[in-house]
Amino acid sequence: MKKMISRLAIFALALAAVVTIADRGDAQMHPMMLPLTTTMVITKPAPGEIYGDRQVVTMGVGAKTYKFVLKDAYVDDPRGIVHWPDIWQLVRQSRPNFNVSGIDEDTFAQMKPGDTLTVRGMFSPNNQTYEVVGTEPGGGPSAPGQHY
């Protein structure tokens, strides 16, 4: 009888360990993920502008860092596993938040205060690189409709 109780106790401990370990693994982004298609709508603030409760994102291009107000952002993950809050949680404490590379990386330096830009790119969670694939002036698909 004692032998059966000790076997049952060992089995219960092993089961509890497996459940605990499996639960922790799902809370983190997978380390070897493929780059994710990510779109951000950013605005360059005026000098001395107070940000208030707006989300601020920094982009590192070479040795320079540019600061923008984030108006909208989304991830095109076909599996539906990764969303913008997951990426923001990963990069929010880094300075700069994103290391920018790609064909339109010089666009950030050319922006004037008040300009809004839609930036499409590939975000790599492994090294926080954001490779710019294309840019479009304005708010893109998330912009409010214009009335003429």
Image: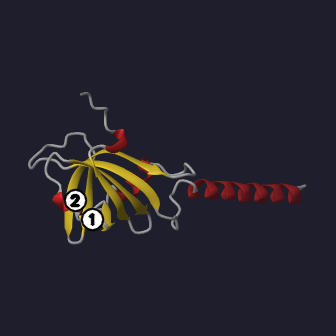
Q: Nearer the viewer, residue 33 or 143?
A: 143
Q: Residue at x 38, y 65 (%)?
A: 128
**Do labels 1 and 2 touch, CB within 8 Å?**
yes
How packed mark 1 is, by other alpha carbons closer than 10 Å (few <14, some 14-19, many 20 or more), is many
Amino acid type, label 2: Phe
112 or 84: nearer the viewer: 112
Q: Quadrant of the N terminus?
A: bottom right
In the figure, residue 103 lies in which quadrant?
bottom left
Q: Is residue 5 left or right of residue 119?
A: right
State which quadrant residue 64 falls in: bottom left
Please give the name of the residue rendered at 67% of the width and 54% of the height, measured from the top-left corner: 19
| Outermost residue, front side | 148
Q: Determine whether the residue tagged by mark 1 lies in a helix, strand or loop.
A: loop
Please give the residue where the numbered disc 1 appears in the rendered image. 105
Q: Position of residue 45 (x, y in %)?
A: 16, 47
State the SS at label 2. helix
The residue under the point 24% across, 28% down is 148
Neighbours of disc 2 within 10 Å: few (<14), some (14-19), many (20+) = many
Pinpoint residue 20: horizontal percent, then vertical percent.
Answer: 63, 55
Which residue of the protein is positioned furthest toward the top in this rendering? 147
Residue at image coords 20%, 40%: 52
Provide residue 125's location: percent of width, then percent of height: 44, 63
Q: Quadrant of residue 139?
A: top left
Residue 65 place in picture, x, y as percent: 21, 63
Viewer-closest of 14 and 92? 92
Residue at the extreme right: 1
Q: Amino acid at mark 1?
A: Glu
Which label is found at residue 108?
2
Above or below, comparing residue 49 to residue 100 in the picture: above
- Specify whether 30 is left or right of 123: right
Q: How far is disc 1 from disc 2 in space, using C-alphas?
A: 6 Å
Query: Compared with residue 10, is residue 72 higher up or lower down, i.e. above or below?
Result: above
